[in-house]
Amino acid sequence: MEFSRMEFFKELGESCVLPTAQQGVEQVWQLLLLCLLFCLLCRLGLSSSLKHLGSVAAGLYALYLFFEQSMVWVLLLSLLCYTVLFLNRNSSSRGIFLSATILIYLLMGELHMIDSVTWHKMRGSQMVVAMKAISLAFDLDRGTVLALPSPLEFTGYIVFVGTVIFGPWISYSSYKEAIESHKLSLSWLQRFSVSWVKCQVCLVISNCIAPYLFPYFIPIHGSKGLRIWLHAYENAVSFHFSNYFVGHLSESTALLAGAGFTEDKDNVKWDLKVVKPLNVELPRSMVLVVTSWNVPMSRWLNTYVFKSAMKLGTFPAVIVTYTASALLHGFSFHLGAVLLSLGFITYVEHVLRKRLAAIFSACILSKRCSTDCHHQYQLGINYPILLGCISDLWVYGINLAFSAMAIFHLTYLGSMFDADIDNLAAEEGYAANHTIQKWSELGWASHWLVFGCWLFYRLLL
């Protein structure tokens, strides 16, 4: 049966938009309530021990709400982490030891220590626990945290109700600040409300708008080859907004639980940012995409992986960082393929733009130049087009070309996250042949483009 456009929009609103928004509220309202109750509990003037105990109780109940008896695997990982930290409390390599232990544990889980569907559902919580424990271990090694926390303090941090289900990662010092009795303000409520509305909007876009982007919302038709790319873009956008949904939801839970602020004297600013959608959908570069996809995780990878691996050299450090990200996300072929491809894409883009910027003395680097940069040509970077000279418009054009190239890469990489695949297959993880099939349909275009950019960079040396 063919629908007119107005009939389609009406049906979409009734059968998708409203049910999706309703289900989004139904699935997380108890978690939001737990976060609010814990936030209020921390402002009753209780001792630190009682606050940590409240964090443990709220976090355990949240884990039970989402995973029921399977929560024991998250707790087992937490216990394992503390045991390793305690046994190596006099070592200066706790971060390395703990990272290796967690890697072995995750590998055992991926090799079907429990059924794959259950394990994949807990993957997000497992990843947050692993990141928190590893960051604490490295902070102990570096002296940022002076002493190993007590079992109660450690567990309160690991299962902190504002982050244990959806994230984001926060440092141990940020957790301790969150349980202090900072006065709540209207800006706190406004910031939570904005994040909550954004997460609901992103959920609706992911489920109800992105899969029907062409031709219902954007009336574009074309040949079979064009339709394949349009469908790939739909899949990519749907996947992007599902990530934004989780990101803004994690902002909401963290803020509601009292985390996600910076303090300057007596001024408390609730400024937690987990995702930056505009930097992904309208990117300056792929480097900016990966740092905006999940801001706290990007900071974690940079602080605890990339900087530690820089002694190996820039390119090996990039590959180690993306490998670490792939391992944390799970031992699945499609995620590993995407993340390692991102490693090569971002490295080649970075070195190519750095070389071009040096040759032309222009602001065409992967990251935006600072206001005091010494490049001769800066149009489109530090001031509007209309204020520049016509002869400088080529700088804007080059940056625009790299932006288009980034959108092309994102479409290609996101094509495998197919909205049409059945839920069970998605929960168990996409098979390797699914990834190969999707990229084969697109002619391995992104990989060929990266290879061409690398050859061009080598010619410029």
Image (tube, rainbow, N blue to C red):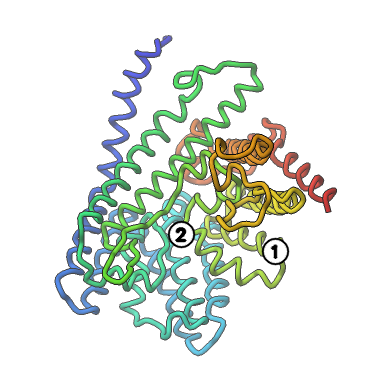
Q: Dot 2 corresponds to which residue?
A: 296
- Residue 428 placement (x, y as % from top left): 50, 46
Answer left or right for 247 relative to 392: left
Tell me where residue 13 sits by quadrant.
top left
Q: Residue furthest bottom?
A: 90
**Count of numbered circles on the image:** 2
- Residue 274 placement (x, y as % from top left): 42, 53
Helix, strand or loop at label 2? It is helix
Q: Residue furthest left?
A: 44
Q: Residue at x 36, y 61 (%)?
A: 164
Say which amino acid is labelled 1. Thr
Say which amino acid is labelled 2. Pro
Q: Residue at x 67, y 53 (%)?
A: 375
> Where, quadrant-wise, is the N terminus in this rendering?
top left
Residue 8, placed above or below residue 173: above
Q: Earlier in the sequence, mark 2 or mark 1?
A: 2
Please rate how many residues cluster around mark 1, counting C-alpha atoms within 10 Å: few if below 14, some from 14 to 19, many from 20.
some
Q: Residue at x 54, y 57 (%)?
A: 110
Residue 252 versus residue 157: which sits nearer the camera? 252
Answer left or right for 312 relative to 125: right
Answer left or right for 392 relative to 424: right
Tell me where residue 103 sits by quadrant.
bottom right
Q: Dot 1 corresponds to which residue?
A: 314
Helix, strand or loop at label 1? It is helix
Q: Residue at x 62, y 59 (%)?
A: 323
Answer yes or no: is residue 275 visible.
yes
Residue 326 versus residue 263: which sits nearer the camera? 263
Residue 87, placed above or below residue 289: below
Answer yes or no: is residue 409 visible.
no
Residue 279, placed above or below residue 324: above
CA–CA distance between discs 2 and 1?
A: 22 Å
